[in-house]
């Protein structure tokens, strides 16, 4: 079954790459043709290609709120009572939260330092409703965005932060009901899997959207914009290597020289995640290798599944990079306070999102809507997302492996 998923993921990645190449080629032809007459490519010609990306983005927005609600409620209901999960649960969550903040803050610092989107110089779409180059939120605006007057209103308007607040209360209340709450948890867990299956269906349209988006971008901007993409990818991988260095340094403080043995054990699962674009595909092998490394079986079976919902270090760094890259591409300035608010939103909305290919795009879409950044910018990432997915999936595996080993060491369960 895993091989089948891997082959399907690899085929989709290949189709996306081919669609990107085709879009670049057609966009270049259109750009050169109209440049020869000293004119821009008419919007009437580009409109059909824009529609391809718009339809895909609408489908993505359709599933954002239900996915966040269902996955977050299930995650909180299962682990929301820290007293119930005891000492190990407390230490595990402490490590996960600290690691999440490191990933998000490092991503924020690097994307502000490199400013990869500043070279795009894209006009803000008229339909986006954004009329200013400053998208900062006041404290009053942020507070008013936190508390929903209605869950259905929040879902209809894609106010993801309000959905998160309701989900947190709902999840904790469900957990407190005991046996009665288990029915709701099972139902929402099934609902979450249905939405994730829908996500897989929608992602099958990604190659068509990539073709349309790349055609429009290259036709308007020319091939010079490709240098921006290559810089963005390179800067993101630099960020991943820095994050890896930080994690290994902290792990060395706990495991000393055994950290090198851990890297040898998790090498194959990390490569599986890298090649399949999915940290989920590496889960069975990772479970086995951590036990071989010496981690206690009970701790592995507790920490690792929890980590796949709460400790996606690579995905969180990517979401920070992606959200701010899109804002920079449209010339939208986000002050420090707004960026920190964005990190808090990403911190919450990322919890419970499965480690499957391109699931991070759903979270990014919700974040863009919350901060009034044009969701059309998501189309800028579709062509290069598979290349980013490989890095963030393998980093998710490494981050969860380190967390499991460290908690095992804390508990004296590392043989």
Image: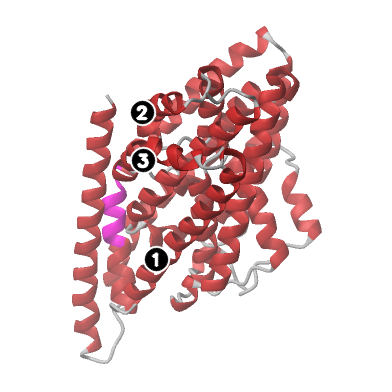
Closer to the chain start, of discs 3 and 1, is 1
Magenta residues, start to end: 204-212
> Can you identify the residue that label 1 sits on?
234
| Residues marked 2 and 1 touching at CB (< 8 Å) | no
Q: Nearer the viewer, mark 2 or mark 1?
A: 2
Circles 2, 3 touching at the beta carbon (< 8 Å): no
Mark 2 — residue?
Answer: 285
Badge number at residue 267: 3
Please name whichever residue, 189 or 55, is drawn nearer the observer in this view of the structure.
189
Local crowd size for mark 3, using a 10 Å CA cut-off: few (<14), some (14–19), many (≥20): some
Outermost residue on the top side: it is 179
Residue 153 seen = no
Query: Residue placed at 44% from the left, 58% from the top?
Result: 378
* Numbered disc 2: secondary structure: helix
Q: Quadrant of residue 160?
A: top right
| Mark 2 or 3: the one toward you | 3
Please state the horizontal and vertical placement of residue 355, each as a whole percent of the image. Answer: 44, 37
Residue at horizontal 33 percent and vertical 45 percent from the top = 274
Expressed as whole percent of the image width and height from the top left, the position of residue 364 reads: 51, 51
Left or right, residue 273 beside residue 175 = left
């Amino acid at each position: 079954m895993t091989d089948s998923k891997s082959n399907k993921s690899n085929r989709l990645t290949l189709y996306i790459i081919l669609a990107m190449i085709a879009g670049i080629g057609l966009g270049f032809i259109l750009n050169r043709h109209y440049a020869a007459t000293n004119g821009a490519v008419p919007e009437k010609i580009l409109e059909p290609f824009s529609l391809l990306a718009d339809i895909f983005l609408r489908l993505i927005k359709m599933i954002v709120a239900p996915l966040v609600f269902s996955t977050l409620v299930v995650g909180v209901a299962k682990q929301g009572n820290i007293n119930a999960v005891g000492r190990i649960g407390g230490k595990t969550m402490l490590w996960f939260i600290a690691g999440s903040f490191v990933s998000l803050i490092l991503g924020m610092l690097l994307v502000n330092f490199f400013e990869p989107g500043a070279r795009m110089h894209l006009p803000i779409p008229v339909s986006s409703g954004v009329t200013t180059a400053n998208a900062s939120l006041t404290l009053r605006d942020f507070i008013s965005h936190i508390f929903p007057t209605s869950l259905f209103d929040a879902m209809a308007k894609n106010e993801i932060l309000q959905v998160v607040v309701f989900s947190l209360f709902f999840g904790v209340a469900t957990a407190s009901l005991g046996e009665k709450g288990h029915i709701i948890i099972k139902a929402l867990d099934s609902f979450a899997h249905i939405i994730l299956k829908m996500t897989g269906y929608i992602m099958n349209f990604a190659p068509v959207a990539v073709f349309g988006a790349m055609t429009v971008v290259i036709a308007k901007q020319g091939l010079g914009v490709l240098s921006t993409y290559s810089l963005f990818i390179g800067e993101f991988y630099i960020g991943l290597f820095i994050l890896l260095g930080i994690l290994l340094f902290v792990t060395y403080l706990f495991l000393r020289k055994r950290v090198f043995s851990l890297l040898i054990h998790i090498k194959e699962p990390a490569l599986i995640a890298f090649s399949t674009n999915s940290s989920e595909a590496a889960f069975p092998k990772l479970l086995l290798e951590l036990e071989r490394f010496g981690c206690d079986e009970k701790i592995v079976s507790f920490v690792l599944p929890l980590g796949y919902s709460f400790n996606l270090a690579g995905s969180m760094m990517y979401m920070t990079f992606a959200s701010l890259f899109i804002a920079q591409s449209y010339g939208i300035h986000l002050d420090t306070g707004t960026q920190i608010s964005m990190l808090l939103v990403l911190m919450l909305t990322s919890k419970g999102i499965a480690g499957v290919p391109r699931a991070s795009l759903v979270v990014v879409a919700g974040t863009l809507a919350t901060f009034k950044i044009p969701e059309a910018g998501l189309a800028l990432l579709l062509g290069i997302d598979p290349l980013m997915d490989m890095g963030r999936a393998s980093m998710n595996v490494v981050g969860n492996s380190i967390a499991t080993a460290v908690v095992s060491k804390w508990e004296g369960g590392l043989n």
